[in-house]
Image (spheres, grey):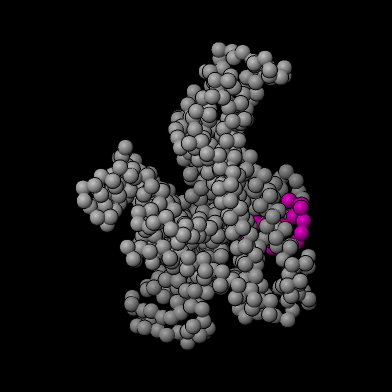
């Protein structure tokens, strides 16, 4: 029993160590003379590796991450929610038996495979649609990330929808609702906290996704809303640094820890908001 | 809370309950005619069918495109040779064995640790402040991007916080560098450091899936054992764990399949290593299959894309094997307990 309590404490140790390591190295980064907190948060330029003058403004990386995440979300959230409504409210057991395994397989595919898919299938397809899409673009990486988070959105939303008690559906049917009325106007609102939590979890996955963007999004850190443009995300920058583009003691190398800290804060914040939404807006039907 | 599945009336567009023609209430607005609502219902069903099939279509396109690109270059020689600068001679033996070593180490540490934590949280702990903090913390850890775990692994395992110097040559070594029982501190980017780093990534997944398996065991079983005079330990070992084993094993296998596909943390740990031998001890350098795929996929030449696709076929084969075993366990071992 004592040893089990020690095992449980280990997870606390992990979190503490993550925070300590990121904080220590980030402070180390800000101690370099060429860096300042003001520049990090208010400069709109990020070019630590090339050029005579180095700039460390985090926003281009955040903007790249957001662009990819928004593209992924605008594909995965509607498709995932509608699929969840269909699986939970409409589908026969036979249809479920074919759709669920497909989603489970999608969920199990390694992200590097999605990156390869983006690079060799999605990007050439986009190039056929419009020549403005180059070899690397945010759209391709965003769509692949959307495919990656689709099973998360779908299965978590479906769990939330199925947890709505049957009595609510029966009551709505008894009032003369069609299946559409029942599922969209009764069941989805009743499960809204769970659905929103699923969305937030999926978004935090998209923000932290690494291999897809490292392969397909490109390497130019810039603030843009153009999905055909090449962008660099926070994770892609970290990959670039850890692949050995910078000496391990330099300011460029240390900057990856500051980026990691920013990423950690963003995703941790989203997880917290998701848990808060679940707690605060949960509808109790017992 | 009742979580009974909703009634399924097949895929018929209109529910049986509306076929009788519900009479609109007098107070309802005039535009909500029955015909219109039945039409909306039918249209929505079609929208649902199309949307839901997007996942199936995407999966089909993905698998077909990968087999199309990689089937021709997949051969036994490809699986049993080492890396090469020439795509025609390159193989995946080193990354395949590296993945195997790293995942074995990862499983040996993560499974006992994760299952132990879950048993403690579900079976022994009082609902104390400590338990609540641990529980929240595990949920939060599950949302941390895997690349951040890579940074933790790099600092904690590969460099050991710089406690043994920063130069690998200064490392404290025990045993012969060629032998099986070779250890050195810090670990550097070795299979041991890699396995431990992956352990951090999948630990929350193992804990959460084990907790779900334990929760699914009806409390009447525990109450029965305790009423017969069993100690809490005897109840857990003799009753709860055996009943939860299929669920725990399914969760464990799915976590391992997550571990075998995970690449970002190990990229942070060791970069892209070209390794020309299989690991011989815990301190060996290693390559892993997903990173080898990343390496080849990132090159511009089509020949490298082809062998990347071949490596993906092998990777997916291993994954489907894992998932198949999980499904088999779920079907064979799971007995209804209620």
B239 over B174 or under it: above or below: above
Could you say which is closer to the camera, residue B300 or residue A23? A23
**Relative to A254, is B75 on the left or the right?**
left
Could you say which is closer to the camera, residue B118 or residue B80? B118
Q: How many marks?
A: 0
> Would residue B85 be visible to someone looking at this image?
no
On the image, the x and y values in percent for residue A99 come to: 50, 36
In this picture, which residue range is highlighted in magenta? A214-232
**Relative to B165, is B50 on the left or the right?**
right
On the image, the x and y values in percent for residue A243 come to: 59, 70
Q: Residue furthest left?
A: B228
B262 over A186 or under it: above or below: below
The C terminus of chain B, quarter of image:
top left
Residue depicted at x 52% and y 69%:
A16
Residue depicted at x 45% and y 30%:
A93
Q: Is residue A217 magenta?
A: yes
Could you say which is closer to the camera, residue B49 or residue B338? B338
Q: Residue furthest bottom?
A: B170
Could you say which is closer to the camera, residue B19 or residue A271? A271
On the image, the x and y values in percent for residue A159 come to: 50, 40
Q: Is residue A168 magenta?
A: no
> Would residue B30 be visible to someone looking at this image?
yes
Residue depicted at x 46% and y 79%:
B186
Residue depicted at x 60% and y 63%:
A264
Q: Quadrant location of residue B39?
A: top right
Please name the predominant secondary structure of the magenta segment in the image. loop
On the image, the x and y values in percent for residue A63 come to: 72, 58
């Amino acid at each position: 029993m004592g040893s089990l309590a020690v095992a449980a404490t280990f997870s606390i140790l992990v979190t503490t160590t993550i925070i300590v390591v990121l904080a220590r190295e980030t402070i180390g980064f800000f101690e370099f003379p060429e860096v300042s907190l003001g520049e990090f948060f208010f400069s709109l330029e990020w070019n630590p590796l090339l050029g005579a003058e180095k700039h460390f403004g985090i926003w281009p990386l955040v903007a790249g991450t957001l662009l990819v995440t928004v593209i992924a979300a605008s594909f995965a959230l509607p498709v995932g929610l509608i699929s969840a409504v269909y699986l939970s409210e409409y589908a026969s057991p036979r249809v479920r038996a074919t759709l669920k395994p497909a989603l489970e397989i999608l969920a199990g595919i390694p992200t590097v495979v999605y990156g390869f898919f983006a690079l060799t299938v999605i990007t050439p397809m986009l190039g056929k649609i419009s020549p403005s899409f180059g070899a690397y673009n945010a759209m391709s990486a965003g769509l692949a990330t959307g495919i990656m988070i689709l099973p998360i959105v779908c299965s978590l939303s479906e769990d939330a929808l199925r947890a709505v008690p049957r009595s609510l559906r029966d009551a709505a049917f008894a009032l003369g609702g069609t299946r559409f009325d029942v599922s969209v106007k009764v069941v989805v609102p009743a499960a809204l906290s769970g659905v929103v939590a699923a969305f937030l979890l999926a978004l935090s996955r998209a923000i932290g996704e690494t291999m897809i963007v490292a392969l397909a999004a490109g390497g130019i850190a810039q603030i843009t809303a153009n999905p055909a443009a090449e962008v660099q995300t926070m994770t892609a920058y970290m990959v670039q640094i850890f692949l050995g583009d910078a000496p391990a003691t330099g300011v460029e190398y240390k900057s990856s820890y500051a980026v990691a800290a920013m990423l950690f804060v963003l995703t941790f914040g989203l997880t917290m908001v998701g848990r808060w939404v679940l707690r605060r807006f949960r509808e109790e039907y017992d | 809370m009742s979580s009974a599945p909703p009634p399924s009336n097949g895929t018929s567009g209109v529910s049986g309950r509306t076929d009788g023609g519900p009479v609109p209430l007098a107070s309802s607005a005039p535009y909500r005619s029955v015909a219109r609502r039945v039409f909306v219902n039918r249209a929505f069903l079609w929208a649902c069918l199309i949307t839901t099939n997007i996942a199936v279509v995407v999966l089909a396109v993905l698998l077909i495109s990968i087999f199309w690109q990689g089937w021709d270059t997949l051969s036994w020689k490809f699986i049993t040779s080492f890396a090469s600068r020439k795509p025609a001679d390159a193989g995946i033996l080193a990354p395949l064995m590296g993945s195997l070593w790293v995942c074995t180490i990862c499983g040996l540490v993560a499974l006992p640790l994760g299952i132990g934590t879950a048993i403690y949280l579900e079976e022994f702990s009082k609902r104390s402040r400590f338990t609540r903090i641990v529980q929240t913390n595990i949920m939060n850890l599950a949302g941390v991007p895997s690349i951040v775990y890579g940074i933790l692994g790099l600092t904690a395992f590969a460099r050991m916080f710089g406690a043994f110097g920063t130069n690998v040559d200064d490392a404290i070594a025990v045993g012969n560098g060629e032998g099986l029982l070779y250890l050195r501190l810090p670990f550097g980017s070795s299979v041991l450091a890699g396995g431990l780093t992956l352990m951090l990534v999948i630990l929350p997944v193992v804990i959460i899936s084990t907790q779900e398996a334990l929760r699914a065991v009806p409390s009447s079983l525990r109450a029965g054992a305790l009423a017969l005079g069993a100690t809490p330990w005897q109840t857990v070992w003799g009753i709860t764990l055996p009943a939860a084993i299929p669920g725990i094993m399914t969760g464990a296998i799915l976590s391992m399949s997550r571990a075998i596909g995970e690449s970002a943390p190990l990229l942070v740990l060791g970069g892209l290593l070209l390794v020309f031998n299989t690991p011989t001890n815990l301190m060996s350098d290693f390559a892993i299959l997903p990173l080898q795929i990343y390496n080849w996929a990132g090159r511009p030449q089509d020949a490298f894309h082809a062998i990347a696709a071949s490596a993906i076929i092998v990777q997916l084969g291993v994954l489907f094997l894992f998932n198949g075993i999980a499904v088999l366990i779920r079907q064979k071992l799971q007995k209804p307990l209620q």
